[in-house]
Image (cartoon, helix red, strand yellow):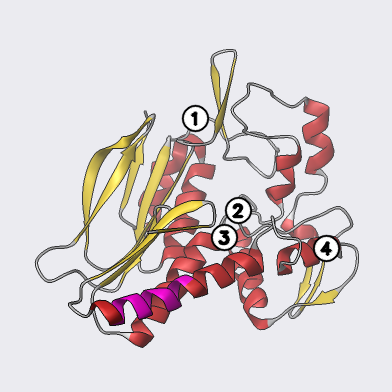
Amino acid sequence: MFDAMASHCEILMESDNRHHVVVWAQRAVAEIKRIEAKFSRYRTDSVISRINQQAGTAMEVDEETARLLNFAAQAHAMSDGLFDVTSGVLRKVWLFDGSDRIPSLSAVQCVSQQVGFHKVKWNPPVLLLEAGMEIDFGGIGKEYAADVALACLQEDCDVPVLVNLGGDICCNRAPAHSGWQVGIEQPDHHQTPVMILDLVKGALATSGDTHRFLLHQGRRYSHILNPKTGWPVEGGPRSVTVAAPHCVEAGMLASFALLQGATAEEFLRQQGVQYWCLWQ
């Protein structure tokens, strides 16, 4: 067990070689920590902070950052603009800090002018943000780190492995006698799984408002924000879990689904993936 990316994390391996397991796990954790340090918006020395500080000026980015920006551009196009890595600036008015404070319409409209990946000039490897805009990989960072950690472990060993970064999970294969047992959280009852899934291979990612929301005059406001309006998505499920070959793919589809609101399940059926939606 370890903490990374503001989450409780774990790496599980089936092996009788304790020494090797420790060495393998340490290398994977180091890679996760590297990704966190590089792309965290909370660190002033991160690549993301440097990009945001230079908004208004063209800058060249490294190959790994370029790959993530390409993925972000693809996700933006596939979601018709609903998945937007520039929408992180909305946190300036939406705090989700446990209070019941709702921003004014004018405040949301003002900060929304700084949102929109279509405004970004991305000619790999050169990036140009409009002044005041920001990039935030928070919506794909854990999933990317989980996939990288699993790939790192598979380079080192040939044993069953599961990587769990705060509920974003991927594995190479099942242990000898059964699949990996993964619980899906019951909204509002965080320690009570509503179901147990048997994960044999691939990834699971969950997105929802179980832990982050506002209650204002009896109304619940999800932290899932529509980047086109700047306001929380309404009418959708409380959480969505998606199975896919890779964690970034599962996470992207779970986020896409939540952003659909009431038509989340219809969207997922069209994608032909396994999914689990909790509405209450």
> How many numbered callouts?
4
Instruction: Please tell me which of labels 1 and 4 falls first in the chain.
Output: 4
Question: Which image quarter: residue 234?
Answer: top right
Foreground mark, 2 or 4, reads: 4
In this rendering, is residue 62 above or below 143?
below
Question: Label 2 vs label 4: CA separation?
Answer: 17 Å
Q: Which x, y percent locates residue 205?
A: 40, 55
Q: Which residue is mark 2?
A: 83
Label 1 element class: loop
In this rendering, is residue 158 above or below 45?
below
Q: Residues within 10 Å of mark 3 (few under 14, many from 20)?
A: few
Give the magenta range.
20-29
Q: Are marks 2 and 3 in contact (CB under 8 Å)?
A: yes
Q: Which x, y percent locates residue 131?
A: 89, 57
Question: Label 1 vs label 4: CA separation?
Answer: 33 Å
Question: Going 69% across and 57% down the picture, which residue do you hit?
Answer: 41
Instruction: Please tell me which of labels 2 and 3 falls first in the chain.
Output: 3
Residue type at mark 3 is Met
Q: Residue 78 shows which numbered tag? A: 3
Instruction: Please tell me which of labels 1 and 3 falls first in the chain.
Output: 3
Q: Which residue is mark 1?
A: 235
In this rendering, is residue 35 above or below 222?
below
**Residue 73 visible in the picture:** no
Viewer-proximal residue among 263 and 224: 224
Label 3 element class: helix
Foreground mark, 1 or 4, reads: 4
